[in-house]
Amino acid sequence: MIRLYVISGRDVEEKTKDEFENIRKKGILWIDVYDPTAEEVEWLKKEIHFEMPSKEIMGDIEISSKYTEVGDSININMSFVIQQKEEIIVEPVFFFIRERYFVTLRYRDIPTLMIFLNRLKMKRGYIQFSESLFGEILSIEVDRIGDRLEILGRRIRNIWKEIFVEQSEEMIKDIAYYDELNITLRESINEKIRILSRFLKSPLINAQTKREMKTLLDDLNTLLDYTAFYMEKIDSIQNSLLGLITIRQNEAVKVFTVLATIFLPATLIASIFGMNFEIMPELSWKYGYPYSLFLMVTVTLALMLWVRRKGWL
């Protein structure tokens, strides 16, 4: 599916590809491509010389696949973090910038692009260059990453307090999720820093957009420091939680060990008097049974008193 948006200053009009010939010179043309068909791929190649990248290239982590310049066009392959309740998805989006054309290629809904489209329709930004569209989208994504990290920081502080009250399996799952989210955001930030570093050196980018991008680069470096701090904090929580769980397990083992020690002499006495050898004087002793019970109770109580004085129970 292909959607066309004609952008002239603050005015945005949504068109179909059948109207391409009439609108191609009216302003900046944003072509949003969603899971294109073979026919649509051929149309893009014919009309704006857009070469369709493979899904393998879109998933590559090499900088040579993330940012390339071919003639007067810029190709950018950037990932977006989509956070769901129990899953964190990293979805690539391919950007093509050439003259007044700006193409986004994706295979699923990207929240950042939806926010950007809404802002355009609300006329909240003035767009003068095609590369400015990329800058606006990146700015929204950086803000979203910052918001996620802010929420992540609050949850980490809350869980730090909770681990001293209760250590549960659900808490361990939450920590693992937060750790994965932090690492994913850190990888996404690193990717964007690498792309921006190349983007700022391009002679195809105007000076105004470069100034805006330098601000975003500073923001990304700041966010990277936050992820490093949260990584250390999560490691500290995991170590503390592991220590508390170990202490709790040791307490349980200690109780069972002490109880076994207390009742071991009574078990030994019962075993001795439970033997059935032919010559055992106690078998015919009138007070043998009450004596053995008295002996077991006395030894057990004595051991319990001794353990209590030691502070083991």
Image (spheres, rainbow, N blue to C red):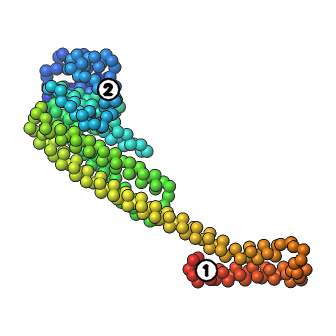
Mark identifier at residue 17? none
* Residue on which the image places disc 2: 54
Name the residue at 62% across, 71% down. Answer: 257
Q: Residue 165: where, in percent of width, then height?
A: 46, 65
In the rendered structure, the answer to whether residue 178 lies left or right of residue 115 reads right
In the rendered structure, the answer to whether residue 134 lies left or right of residue 2 reads left
Q: Name the amino acid, label 1.
A: Val
Relative to 70, residue 243 above or below: below
Label 1, label 2: how far apart the Cα atoms are? 72 Å
Relative to 91, residue 85 above or below: below
Relative to the observer, which residue lies in front, 34 or 253? 253
Q: Residue 168: where, in percent of width, then height?
A: 50, 58
Name the residue at 46% across, 61% down. Answer: 242
* Residue on which the image places disc 1: 307
Name the residue at 22% across, 34% down. Answer: 67
Query: Can residue 127 be seen in this snapshot?
Result: no
Name the residue at 18% across, 41% down. Answer: 197
Relative to the observer, which residue lies in front, 10 or 21? 21
Q: Earlier in the sequence, mark 1 or mark 2?
A: 2
Q: Secondary structure at mark 2?
A: loop
In the rendered structure, the answer to whether residue 154 lies left or right of residue 138 reads right
Q: Residue 184: where, in percent of width, then height?
A: 34, 45
Q: Secondary structure at mark 1?
A: helix
Residue 154 placement: quadrant: bottom left
Q: How many marks?
A: 2
Q: Residue 31: where, in percent of width, then height?
A: 24, 25
Relative to 312, residue 176 above or below: above
Relative to 83, residue 251 above or below: below
